[in-house]
Amino acid sequence: MPKDYIYPEFEIVRNEGRCTVCRRCEEQCANRAHAFDAATSRMTAEDARCVDCHRCVAMCPAHALKIVQSSHTFRPGANWTRDAITDIHRQAGSGGALLTSMGTPKDYPVYWDKLLINASQVTNPSIDPLREPMETKVFLGQKHTHIQRDESGRICTELHPQITLATPILFSAMSYGSLSYNAHESLARAAQELGICYNSGEGGLHEDLYHYGPNTIVQVASGRFGVHPGYLKAGAAIEIKMGQGAKPGIGGHLPAEKVMGDVSRTRMIPQGTEAISPAPHHDIYSIEDLRQLVYTLKEATDYKKPIIVKIAAVHNISAIASGVARSGADIIAIDGFRGGTGAAPARIRDNVGIPIELALASVDARLREEGIRGSISIIAGGSIRNSADVVRAIALGADAVYIATGALLAMGCHLCRSCHLGRCNWGIATQLPELVSRLDPEEGKRRLVNLITAWTYEIKEMMGGMGINSIEALKGNRLMLRGIGLTQKELDILGVLHAGE
Amino acid sequence: MSIEGQVRIPSGCAITSVFSKSGENISGRLVVDSIATMHERSNGLGGGFAGYGIYPQYKDLYAFHIFYDTLAARQACEAFIDRHFDVVNLSKIPVRKHPNIIDEPLIWRYFLTPLPTKLKDSQLDESEFTKRCVIRINDSIEGAYVFSSGKNMGVFKAVGYPEDVGDFYRLEDYEGYCWTAHGRYPTNTPGWWGGAHPFALLGYSIVHNGEISSYDANRRFIEMYGYRCNLQTDTEVITYIVDFLHRRRGLTLAEVASVIAAPFWTTIATKPAEEREKLTYLRNTFASLLITGPFSILLGFDGGIMALNDRLKLRSMVVGERGDRVYIASEECAIRVMEPDLEKLWAPRGGEPVIVRLNAGAQGR
Ligand code: SF4
Ligand code: SF4
């Protein structure tokens, strides 16, 4: 139907002078954007199939390819933009919700970029991380300050269960099924080498990955996929997924074609069935119910594992967090609305929820006002892009941060936002064996380890600049931040002064 | 210009102290002479002293020293005090006019004890009740500021060079087993007497040299436990931390030191199992009370004194000893002027507390 024809967003530009017609691009592109034309002995390209994942660009031995944004245009308008128009054409044609993946591309304020970090001058020396010890180890879990002593006066050192991290970064939940086995194994190996944790996501844990348990957080989501006693006991902690920043208020959906072989076995559902996790947990309709699930999981694991409750950053976040802190949970993970996803309705991803910076600042302030900040640790996630974002998140009050998109990028993702199509050319968000094999878990691990090592070094450098030699002295240390270009209301919510004040 | 409390003012400083383990009476004059040698480390914008064992005749009563900006503040504060305490004695603190000490507030002293009925109703112990009253006054009575609230001890402080402040308060008229002193080098000029040091709460007094980089992390944590950091100074937050850990949570001073100047994880890893568990527990539980950045503090408390440096030792501090006397100061010259002929002189390592107490049975206890 010609009405629905949408001119491709990207054009594949081949430098014919350089192209040797080796046909590698054809072989690499699972979307079949490249083809060989026997009649002319030249390569052809089908722009409409290109998702802009750069696989061919990176693999072309002659550097003959580039992908450019099409200059094709509608009559320009600030209100009826290209996306606004084509979305309508698409929906008028299909009658369905628009599906997308990864974090929202919309132009919402990124508060990280409006928070500047302090450094010492004169009155207080900066510290050189290459010469002096600089500590980034953190413990996540409940911390109660009442001291108990035995008869001989020795302090009882028994604590609520904790997770120990060598650096305050964790890989956040990405399920096996939405990600390939090799991607999961890369994350697991990297977490082990780095002394941090990765998160199984809601699709269960592949049996071959159980031995990474001490560096694994196992997730329990509304679909309960792959949940059994052995799974709960396998990890360092259990995460109850109440929500996800990219799609607050709705559940997950793994298309039937990805539910094959090991994925179906690990999820404990039949092959070729849609894996749909409901929007709410059907045993949690209120905060008391959450408490029951928290304690059910604690009972099931002999009170040895910290329980994380992950919630999406929504308008009433601080009240919700206060409830979670009183539910017996040990850690709360807050996921901001710019966070990524393997598949989500575009309208929800782009419009529902609030930024992590504001959510984190108000939750931390609220829990302190109520005197219960020590009852729960906070993990902040939802678009942490670099080490400076980590520093800012911790200074606002987080104990640690979750990263996912950053981890995928490290493994080779080029952020084409097509994960939901299942044909990830980088072997990450796919179950097609020929694509999965493109990601070598050892190479994936090496790149993840490099990334976190580099960030940790940068965090130490920034801490040293501030005259801080241990990460705990940065936590909630909002005097180390100043806002730039923010309104008084924004500054008040973030609890920081403006630059120059 | 904003006064202390409306803005956070970093400052460098000098500190000194003398302690008699046998509880001998030492004149306040001695420590005034000591701090005077470090004139260059102050800039005339704050000086002060704390003396312990100076009020033996009222040793079971709380001694409140209060600055009032106005008569109205005094009336409001005294009305509050009368509602909560039995006042046994009150007077102006005697001072001597000094050309360099100007703009003095009204300076009053009260010896008092909590009203038994009020105390019972509050369901608090005497010290917690008194602490809350002090915080109430400082937080809510405009122009009134309790700057000393311990038993058998007192703080004397003002805007000026410390030796002038000592003259002003006639410290030669006081005798005690322990004195600490402070000269301040703030980086702007608040000109408010409450901002001078020592900072004190109940029997704890702190003089401190340094600028801590963990300030806001520490402040935001301790404020969860009923403290209000109105002055925004390091010394204030450190005092509250000590009060919280030592008095309220019952940690020993050595344990307090291992929270606020915690050993590095690499050091903890080398300790025997029991010690390692304890240090890990304390460091984890009180993570937000770790103090980073340069500091050297002298903590005066009932019957003793503790000296502590930050764990990298970014500020100078030396200890001298002769006989039953212990001297601790930012610079050796401040000790030599008190006792030229020392038996021992050493610089404690970063994070290693030096704790000195009165001998068993010593007077002044
Ligand atoms: S990979 Fe490069 S050189 Fe090879 S066919 Fe494609 S465009 Fe030509
Ligand atoms: S994971 Fe793969 S499909 Fe998803 S955005 Fe990255 S490159 Fe594209």
Image (cartoon, rainbow, N blue to C red):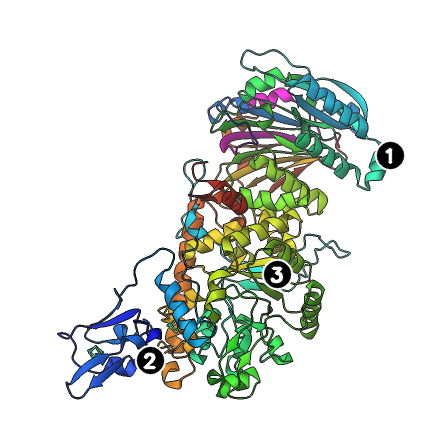
Which tag is nearer the camera, tag 3 or tag 2?
2
Q: Which residues are magenta?
A: B7-34
Left or right of B92? Residue A105 is: left
Asked which secondary structure carries label 2, the reply is loop
Report the chain holding disc 1: B
- The part of the image, by quadrant, that contains residue B97 is top right
User: Are the numbered discs 1 and 3 placed on the same chain, yes or no?
Assistant: no
Asked which secondary structure carries label 1, the reply is helix
Q: Amino acid at mark 1?
A: Thr
Asked which secondary structure carries label 3, the reply is loop
Please tell me whether residue A63 belongs to the stretch shown in magenta.
no
Q: Position of residue A119 (x, y in %)?
A: 42, 43
Q: Say few, some or many: other residues with alpha carbon within 10 Å of mark 1 (under 14 / 14 to 19 / 20 or more).
A: few
Report the chain holding disc 3: A
Residue pointed to by mark 1: B117
Q: Is residue A133 visible?
A: no
Q: Amino acid at mark 3?
A: Gly
Report the chain holding disc 2: A
Residue pointed to by mark 3: A141
Q: Amino acid at mark 2?
A: Asn
Residue that extends furthest to the right in the rendered view of this protein: B117
Residue at the location (68% across, 24% down)? Answer: B66
CB under 8 Å between discs 1 and 3: no
**CA gap, disc 1 to disc 3?**
42 Å
Left or right of A436? Residue A40 is: left
Q: Position of residue A365 (x, y in %)?
A: 59, 48
- For label 2, being within 8 Å of ligand 2 is answered no
Total tally of numbered discs in the picture: 3
